[in-house]
Image: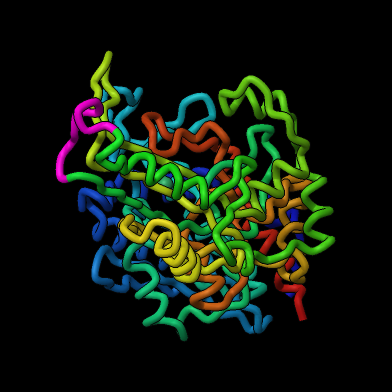
Amino acid sequence: MTVKREPIEQQISKKQDEYIEMLFQLLRQPSISSEDIGVRECATLLKELMCQSGINAQVIDTEGHPIVFGEVYSSNSDFTLLIYGHYDVQPAEPVDEWLSPPFEPEIREGKIFARGAGDNKGQLMAQVLAVKTMLDLYGELPVNVKMVFDGEEENTSKNFEPFVLKYRELLKADLVYTSDGPLDSSGAPIVMLGCRGMLYLELTAEGAERDNHSGNKGGIVPNPAWKLIHLLHSMCAPDGMVKISGFYDQVRQPTAKELKQITKLPYDSVETARAFGLKTLAMDGSTYYRKLSLEPTFNISGLTSGYGGEGVKTIIPSKAKVKLDIRLAADQNPDDIYTLVKQHVEMHAPDVRIRCLGKVKPSRTSLSLDTVQRVIASVKTAYNQEPIVMLASGATFPDYVFTQTLGIPSVLVPYANADENNHAPNENMDVVCFFQGIKTTCQVLVDLGKIR
Ligand SMILES: [Zn+2]
């Protein structure tokens, strides 16, 4: 099928009012997953909007909130794009800080205000309406499209991996495409190829049964705070290098191409320091992105023991506790890292208790893949601007469900404006960003259709 850009853009501008109204219908339906408000009703409505757009859609039950699945087959290509998004939203509190009611969408100064406008209903509807645009114009798509819309992304997505395992065949695809989160604050588009994983641990050291007088019993009763500090000292050097044996063994080594990509990313050390609340940041851009995207961390996120209040209290505490969030680089397996940390503790402080409070695997999709290069080119064409290609987000989200559980490469291309206020009062999406999102999805479908 031959597809040109102009008729697509004309079709989108012709349908502007209808598309906004379809989005507004979805925004008017609350779908707060953590409070179980309106989620199923929203799933049914989304299914209807997808069917109206020519997508063969269904609501599929899980142990929690349902998932909305849709598909459109194409006779033009064997390629299948799997689009992920979520139709649930965060609670609207504090409601009195909203300038218009959170579930009564309104356009002011070029922005659509409503809970879910940016995160993620506006971005998800941009995908749905891209499919509608192409089907209305051409009667078919350049590639097969599947859509999977989660109903509890804002509440840990705990039933998503079981769903994916159960419907592995249904979800078969060549590439996963997600639009969530904001564009760069400069307005530049972003293509993200993965994220770090996380292992969350708690270590507890115990001394005497109760706190003791540090004079009467000082030098006799052992101090668990010191025990924990000595243990932590054996785990990580002052420069951040982790000293636990085998910790770095699995870390994927960056390719020359990836290292080169990092040097192209925008970086301003003064601006970054200001944004982080630091006085200075003595680091070049390559180091900054290498540390953030490609390397693990060993972070102390909480450390508690003894007396921390005003003035003086002379005690030997009975207990000390540390919480660690270890961000994992590509190919580090949280179970293996947990075993290594446990072995280290057993060797250095066998009576310190260790508990795993959470784990998420890292995820990375290769920059070298032809499909990834095509998406980068599509985004550049659609925005008429070079996208910022991030090898991985420093943060953690369950992208591994696609790349590891299903074994499908995955890219994230955010469509919302940088000031979308997601999770906050007056959440919004720029009208321009919404329509740009529809155009971008169309461009991606067209370009992926050229794969033979
Ligand atoms: Zn969110």
Residue 77: tell me if it is visible. yes
Is the residue 223 above or below the residue 197 in the image?
A: above
Where in the figure is residue 45, as x and y percent of width and height? Answer: 31, 59
Q: Nearer the viewer, residue 83 or 364?
A: 364
Taking the spot 35% from the left edge, 23% from the top edge, the residue there is 99
Taking the spot 50% from the left edge, 60% from the top edge, the residue there is 128
Question: Could you tell me what secondary structure mostly forms the magenta stretch?
Answer: loop
Residues in magenta, as a range: 209-218
Q: Nearer the viewer, residue 301 or 218?
A: 218
**203 on left or right of 214:** right
Q: Quadrant of the N terminus?
A: bottom right
Quarter of the image holding residue 378? bottom right
Taking the spot 53% from the left edge, 45% from the top edge, the residue there is 181
Residue 137: tell me if it is visible. no
Is the residue 36 above or below the residue 274 in the image?
A: below
**156 on left or right of 408:** left
Where in the figure is residue 2, as x and y percent of width and height? Answer: 76, 71
Q: How is the image coloured?
A: rainbow
Where in the figure is residue 97, as x and y percent of width and height? Answer: 32, 23
